[in-house]
């Protein structure tokens, strides 16, 4: 899924420009069930969970390999020479604690393989 050209300019801005007028054309899937559970999440956990949601369900995937650099700084596309996103802005310690907390609270599942980027998956009901 590629960011529409009319929205790409907002990725490069330093200041939040405001929400686009057409909300039905500018969204990614977000599970309503989270609404009743935000109170259990720290701010860092919420940021990391949103990042995982965006990179899984937001791209119609059930899991994604996300590096710490991506969580911290985002993804720069060398192909189009643009930032796809700017990450969470969190430092490694905060990311680590957030991931541990999300695992403990059963929001996510991680698959770690030696020498490879960790794969993150949303914990779903059966």
Image (cartoon, rainbow, N blue to C red):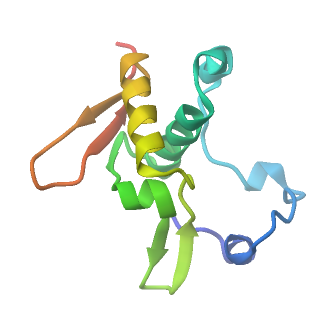
Q: Quadrant of residue 84?
A: bottom right
Q: Judge by depth and name the residue closer to the eye, 20 or 102.
A: 102
Seen in the picture, residue 111 relative to 91 is either above or below; the reply is: above
Left or right position of 73 against 33: left
Q: Please report the residue visible at 48 percent of the width from the left and 51 percent of the height from the top.
A: 91
Q: Quadrant of residue 2?
A: bottom right
- In the rendered image, residue 109, in percent from the top left (x then y), is placed at 31, 29
> In this view, which residue lies farthest toward the front?
93
Q: Quadrant of residue 46?
A: top right
Q: Please report the residue visible at 58 percent of the width from the left and 23 percent of the height from the top.
A: 41
Left or right position of 68 against 87: left
Seen in the picture, residue 34 relative to 52 is either above or below; the reply is: above
Q: Judge by depth and name the residue closer to the eye, 123 or 45.
A: 45
In the rendered picture of this protein, how many numbered marks are placed on residues?
0
Seen in the picture, residue 86 relative to 55 is either above or below; the reply is: below
Left or right position of 39 against 112: right
Q: Please report the residue visible at 75 percent of the width from the left and 55 percent of the height from the top.
A: 25
Seen in the picture, residue 37 relative to 94 is either above or below; the reply is: above
Quadrant containing the C terminus in the rendered view: top left
Q: Judge by depth and name the residue closer to the eye, 93 or 14.
A: 93
- In the rendered image, residue 102, in percent from the top left (x then y), is placed at 43, 26
- In the rendered image, residue 21, in percent from the top left (x then y), is placed at 90, 58
């Amino acid at each position: 899924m590629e960011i529409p050209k009319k929205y790409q300019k907002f990725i490069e801005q330093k200041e939040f420009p405001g929400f686009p007028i057409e909300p039905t054309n500018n969204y990614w899937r977000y599970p309503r069930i989270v609404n009743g559970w935000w109170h259990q999440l720290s701010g860092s956990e919420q940021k990391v969970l949103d990042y995982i949601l965006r990179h899984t369900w937001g791209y119609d995937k059930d899991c994604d390999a996300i590096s710490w650099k991506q969580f911290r700084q985002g993804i720069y596309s060398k192909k189009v020479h643009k930032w796809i996103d700017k990450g969470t802005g969190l430092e490694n310690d905060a990311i680590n604690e957030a991931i541990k907390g999300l695992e403990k609270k059963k929001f996510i599942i991680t698959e770690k393989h030696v020498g490879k980027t960790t794969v993150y998956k949303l914990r779903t009901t059966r």
